[in-house]
Amino acid sequence: MTSRLDTPTTTAQPSARRRLPVPWLGIGLVLLLVSILLAIVIGPASVAGPAPITPFDVLGSAWHHLSTWLAERGLPVTASENPLSLVRDGIIWQGRAPRALAAVLVGAGLALCGVVLQAATRNPLADPYLLGISSGAALGAVAVLILGIAVPLPIAAFVGAVLALLATLALAGIGGRLTANRAVLAGVAVGQAAAAGVSFIIFSTAQGDSYRDILGWLMGTFGAASWSSVLIALVALVVLGGILLGFSRTLDAFAFGDTAATALGVDVPRTRWLLLILSALLTGAMVSVSGAIGFVGLTVPHVVRLLLGPERSGNAALARTSAAVGGIFLLWADTVARTVFTPLEVPVGVLTALLGAPVFALLLLRSRRRGES
Amino acid sequence: MSQTLTAVDLTVDGLGYRVDGIDLLQGASLHLRAGTVTGLLGPNGSGKSTMLRLVVGALPASAGTIAVTEDGTSIDLASMRRRERARRMALVEQDTHAEVPLLVRDVVALGRIPHERRFASAVEGEAIVADAIERAGVSALADRSFDTLSGGERQRVQLARALAQQPRVLLLDEPTNHLDLAAQLDMVRLLREVADTGVAVLVALHDLAQAAQTCDEVVVLRSGEVAAVGDPHEVLSPALLAQVWRVRGEWVTGTHGRALVVSPL
């Protein structure tokens, strides 16, 4: 490989040092499973007796349920004993396990949306709530909580999120092409309007305990997570997240601006509409499960970009890694949120903001040292 | 490898672009022949960048047609899918302020996007990318991050990305802008080499002497209209320089070529 211009000999070796055969997928999976197992085990022991629950109890109990299920279907498996008492079994399988899984899925979904939106709008400050989605969801949820409308809370939140998205897109699309800046500005406007609506409803009607429920929605919490939350988050992540991952090369094309992306064969306005809608739907589903958890979608992609370095900052690697990191991060954040201040439970969004703000400040400092503006 | 591809001519006919009641380009026609370098000249604001963006499809034309002729058949670009269009045509933009923290070789690999399968997550055509990096002379930068490069280096990386697109029509907006003198000469020689592989090159330039030296033909724009087309040595007359650029121009012949001496009218 020789070049016609000022090529030092040091560059003669080709791309051998790229793509080291590190089994990242395996490492990520092991980390994830260990994290889930540990998070399920951690918790106030006093709830069900002084002896702590061990990971082996959880695995044994899981095998008990699985083997019983298999045996009932006539398969040649002997149903094993459950090492957990009935109360503890309930705490684990109806409480902590779905909660942990929901946290992983929501964290992964929010981080993935962050990557997609930051690339699609070419705005490093873009996050899943960019398009007024969190405020819309909060408005839907608060309206149901306080005004007593007979709609399940997650559905109200999801509908609120989708309405906010539609309002944003309509506003951004009025009289022109959907540019990145127009989408961001419209999102800010819709978000502010919805937030004003939330404040007004709370101010005019909220009483007593509803404040705490509302705060849970505004800051985000997994306190009410159930297996149906897990199912909603899982389906949304697999279907919408899967489609979004398929756009990773298209997102790479956005890096140099709309003209460059067009020259690379991307229908920029249409693709941007599609990406905004898909990520808004994914965010809406996640918000309906947990409320609006901030900073995960904003910060995780930046941290991951730093970890991966320019070597692997294509959107494909970035999106997958961010999803994994976001999931594990939110799982641990939730575990801390529900255990550290026992018997009080802090909304997990308070914790992600507490951690996210300084991390973001560090990232800013670092980018200033590199001489970027 | 690009020699084996079909030759493509580009014909622009009566192209217009109107925004907010102002015609930025009006009735512009030109013909690019495969294997030649055509210079797009004109003062600031005469419509050079607008023309390039219209041709590449980044702006919607308000009038006129853009067509390519390949194997004797003429195809209207408006009827062509964007990916198809991007397989035939690449654009090197003027300035890249984008702080993209990607390795240079990955930036060049973006040029493969129109050729990749839909929903591909990895680069296809690594050999073509490597070839483009070598031809544009950026092998030494391949493992650097794009956001650490100088303006001139970025320009060449952008060119490498365009080459990775394997275009039959290559559009460039003032590619010599950030380059020192030697690098400018290198860039225009490179454009000639690209044209020699059968590519139709359309390059917007400010330096008229350089244009005269480099281009087989020039198109001169003035206030959004084509003022002159033809052989640069005939077209760039003192009369035209006075009319279009409002300068007194005098061609001086030296031992290695012609230079333009410019003074106020």
Image (cartoon, coloured by chain):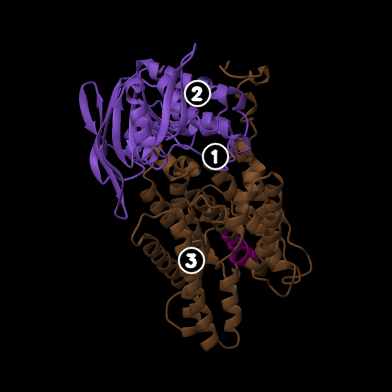
Chain colours: A brown, B purple
Q: Position of residue B70 (x, y in %)?
A: 25, 24
The disc, 1 or 3, on the residue closer to the chain's N-terminal end is: 3
Q: Secondary structure at mark 1?
A: loop
Q: Which residue is mark 2?
A: B187
Q: Which residues are magenta?
A: A91-102
Q: Name the chain letter of the residue that bears numbered label 3.
A: A
Q: Name the chain letter of the residue that bears numbered label 1.
A: A
Going by the numbered disc 2, the residue's amino acid type is Met
* Residue B212 sits in quarter: top left
Q: CA distance from mark 1 to mark 2?
A: 28 Å
- Is the same chain shared between marks 1 and 2? no
Residue depicted at x 45% and y 54%: A180
Main SS, magenta region, reads: helix
Depth check: B37 or A275 in front?
Answer: B37
Going by the numbered disc 3, the residue's amino acid type is Gly
Q: Position of residue A175 (x, y in %)?
A: 33, 60
